[in-house]
Amino acid sequence: MSDELPDAGQVEDYTQAQMAALLKKFDEDKAALTKNQKAAVARYNFKKNKGMDIVFADSPGAAEAKAAAATKPAAAKPAASTGTSAEDILKTLPAELQALAAKDPAELSKDEKIALAKAKSQAMRAASAAKKAAEGPPPEDVAHDKALGFEHAKHLQERFGDALAKWQMQTDKPYAVVKVDRVRDLVRYLRIEMGFDQIRDLTACDYPERTTMEVVYNFSRHRDHAHLAVKVILPRPASQDAELPEVPSIMGIYPGADWLEREVYDMYGIVFNGHTYLKRLLLPEGWTGWPLRKDYDLTKEQFVGLSETGEDIVSFRSEDGW
Amino acid sequence: MAKLITQIGDVDAVPPEQDPNIILTSVDKLLKWGRSNSLWPLGFGLACCAMEMFATIGSHYDIARFGSEVFRSSPRQADLIIVPGTLTKKMAPRVKKLWDQMPEPKWAIAMGACASCGGPYQNSYSTVLGVDKVLPVDVYVPGCPPRPEMLLEGLMRLQEKIRNDPTISPGLERYLKGSKS
Amino acid sequence: MVTHLAPERPPTTPTHTETGLKLVTLNIGPQHPATHGVLRLKTTLDGETIMDVEPVLGYLHRGVEKLFEDGSYLQAIPMTDRFDYLAAMHNNYALCHATETLMGVTEQVPEKAQYIRALTTEVQRVASHLLWLGAFGLDMGAITIFWWTVREREGAIALLERLSGARLTYNWFRYGGVKNDLPDGWLDELAKWIPYMRDRIAEYEGLLRDNDILKLRTVGVGVLDPEVGKAYGCSGPMLRGSGVDWDLRRDEPFNPVYQKLKWNVVTEKEGDNYARYRVRIREMHESLNMLEQMIDMVPQEGDYIDPKIGEGPRQHRMKPPAGEVYAAIEGARGEYGCYIVSDGTNRPYRLKWRAPTLSNLMPLAELTRGLKIPDLIVTLGSVDIVLGDLDR
């Protein structure tokens, strides 16, 4: 008898008798119920299981409950942020501009319109800046200040300020981005003047989304355990066959950069100018491609064989080797 | 191995009083007994499994009691190659060369997951998935790395294989079948 | 179009003697009993005297740094085991420490977990140095020491097996702690093993320390200048054998337990093979002292892993914050480091393994120029390379 039962989703829309009939119908002939009626049954069962108070259409508190349910969605909407809505901006303008804003736009002269628009945009910018200041400084600036808090970093910034693009933190160590042509000067200064005598690591990373590749150097000083990292950002070649980016080699300053640079060349295809023996370190010499770049095609397998003189022959044909 | 031929016709081949002093066998069984119990491996280690091979050589697990008394440094003097570790593409032609330099009869054990099938490096650009792509493997010993007991089990299986091999020269069989290795 | 052409030979390699005779190029390896794995040394010789050595690497290059980017941080841990397989615990620790530094949770690792980490690190150090000693003697023809140390190593490995279930590649460390708690009775077994090991090391010392042949072969051979060592990025016993007082356990503390123990950083002044041998023997003694102190200090109760990070499967979904980090620990061969670039997902964007043996092996040509081939073999032995770490 579905025409007797209201087609409503909330339990409050049913009287107690109607609810009982609805439940009976649910057990017998579920398919005949509409979506809302099924939802009402589900809500009833939920409330019953949780032990909540169930209010029906004919219960004493029904009217208030319905009113409360109606207002709840409106109250649940988050409070609009203060200070940036159009009315608030208008309130910050001086009195005569407010009067202008109140008038119909067609009546305003051109100068008045321009003045009003300028004032409005200025006020908006001031309001958003105030909002940002309330949130705190952006993380890049925090890291920048933290990096320059290190004594050796500050000294380096004073000496090489023009060559260094930005300072950030490598979690707990400061790093600076240096221009490609000043790498050798900076590293020589680091080793000889500042006494950073240990090269800890030299590696690279490929960022296709930013279309850059970075070479990352890590140095440290033995006497006071100071750490410094240096980065060089290079443009990323468009493909594996494109022209290779170049960086000056620091092999003459830190001999430990020798194999590390060869490995970066091997894996990323970055050429280190001035390296005396830039040959592939880990892969056989005729290998095509730069494996650690993100666009390396792993499906194209290469095969290695041996020539009669004992040199590696690398090819894409499987008959030529393994 | 001893006393395999006990009767020639109706007569006992060896009279009972002579029993402890005479051993009768056939030539190929003698040969196979000798070969299986004196497998001298090549001293060859690629990667981590070589450390478990060292442990097998050590006195606790002692591969010498199985006949592998000496690990030969030169392939020309070895008859077994245990390949422990990952085979990379750069190394593969050299392993083939080592295998070719070993004289017949020779056997190969692929020790570890990397030598059997490539191991954890399936998606790598520079590994060969299994040393059986380079040389014919007789026994595969799985594990990463396999325990020394596992390697010894593999060795014992190889010994069994050698003893039960119907041919006297596995290399000749392979050659006649047209295998390139 | 590759625009770079590699030169044919290193410019330091001469081709002729001063008198005009052609020099011999001798290939040692990649299969060679004394190269500790598949390392190829292209030596240029004048008779038996070495003019230059060019190590050729890559015969065990498995491309693991590319594989790291395919799996999660948890899946990277067992892959690191296979780098320096003689000290697999140290590899695990380096990765876990670097990731924890990136996440900023190094302080949150529970105390018991730090103790378990320190215990396993020191037991592993002893085990690694034992096998080094065996191989070192083997290279010189002192085969007895090889049998003895391999037998002793079984004892250390049995301890680590009791702990982690595996003999060589343990996969034991997790982010925020270790995989499991100490088994019952493990500390007692350790307490019994330490004096036994001390006696054994005394036995080896008796055989080797004042041995004339050893001294003739190692004293004054392969001398590494400390400044050169630092500039090459050498670390560990290689650098400490030249007198440089640098140990990350003290200088870049990655485990607070080391601050609570009484121990010394072992250095020797001369920088030759004998000094490096002495450094490693003394380091074994220091490690045993540390283990003895730690047995009494390990807390009975405590978490073995940081509960906020969670165990096992939760670590598979663990997402470190975006950023980069370089962090290192002091392992058996030196500085094991990781440079991690994270993009905020549960897979590393870039995980570079800083191999200690790569930097340690670089000065080989400088160390052995003018020496004979057997000296090269002994020097290579004292550098203590492991190919899995060199080639990755």
Image: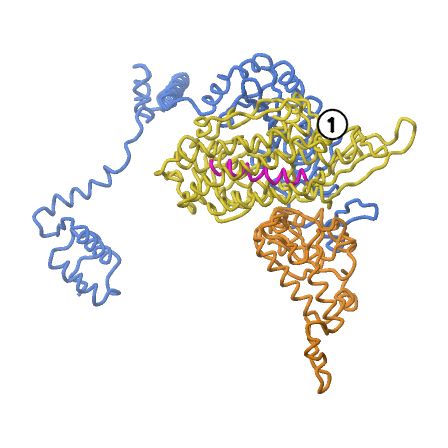
Q: Which contiguous range is marked in magenta?
A: C119-137
Q: Residue B11, position in %: x, y?
A: 71, 85
The residue where tag 1 is placed is C366
Mark 1 falls on what kind of element? helix
Left of A201 or right of it: where is A309?
Answer: right
Amino acid marked by disc 1: Glu
Q: Chain of mark 1?
A: C
Q: C27 and A157: which one is in front?
A: C27
Chain A shown in which color? blue
Is residue C128 part of the magenta span, yes or no? Answer: yes
The main secondary structure of the magenta stretch is helix
Residue A201: tell me if it is visible. Answer: no
Q: Residue A18, position in %: x, y?
A: 13, 59
Q: Is residue C239 above or below residue C291?
A: above
Q: Quadrant of residue B4?
A: bottom right
Q: Residue at x 68, y 41 (%)?
A: C36
- What chain is colored yellow? C
State which quarter of the image contains the C terminus of chain C.
top right
Left of B13 or right of it: where is C122?
Answer: left
Q: C27 and C350: which one is in front?
A: C27
